[in-house]
Image (cartoon, rainbow, N blue to C red):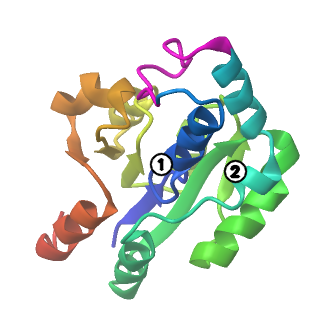
Amino acid sequence: MYNIAFDLDDCLVDLFAEIKKIFKLNNKKYLPVIDWNFSNYPDDIKKQIYEMFQDPKRMCQLKTFSFAKILLKYLKSRGYCINIVTARHENIKQQTINFVYELFGIIPIVVNFGESKLEVLKKLKTDIYIDDCPLQLDTYMKNGIRCILISNKNTLYNWYIRDRLTWFENMKKLYFYFVEKEDF
């Protein structure tokens, strides 16, 4: 059976909902993210986002996406080994582990924010990795890990890589892909 790893933020839980709240609280119109530096965002919004990334209360109460739990449960029931590999700031690692375990019954592997997940994915013998962040996917694929991208209207930052891999707009579509395609 396959070893499948998922990223957490904007794959299984909705980080963009929190970013949208920041815009709303500042009476500004939401802008989709075009890159990982938030270069199209006003400085005050960027500052609040970076502060949020270190706030365990906000980062560990994100809502799950529709079908995220259903997909993980389905894959586990079919005998697949499921891991969650996410990046968080050091000060919220333990809260993240507790949060993910409570949501999904899986103890995640948490790497430092900005750190590559490659060594962890290799150690887990990951066959398929699902993420919204495009920055390391080419490296993962060169190391034999099949990557699936979550890409939609909120993830303009990853559209440039869509033509190089399989991508889905959301967990529901990914779920039906796995259900329909027994041998992927």
Give percent across and percent down for residue 136.
46, 29
Residue at position x 73%, y 22% in the image: 47
Relative side of 3 to 123, left or right: left
Quarter of the figure with residue 73? bottom left
The amino acid type of the residue labelled 1 equals Asp
Q: Residue at x 66, y 13 (%)?
A: 43
Judged by depth in the image, the label closer to the viewer, 2 or 1, is 1
Give the position of the N terminus as an image quadrant. bottom left
Q: Position of residue 140 (x, y in %)?
A: 41, 35
Q: Which secondary structure type mostly characterizes the magenta part of the structure? A: loop
What mark, if any, has residue 10 been given in the picture?
Answer: 1
Instruction: Name the residue that disc number 2 marks.
Output: 110
Which numbered disc covers residue 28? none
Crowding at mark 2 (Cα within 10 Å: few <14, some 14-19, many 20+): many
Queried whether the magenta region covers residue 4, the answer comes back as no
Element carrying mark 1:
loop
Q: Magenta residues, as a range?
A: 30-43
Task: Reply above or below: 183 against 36.
Answer: below
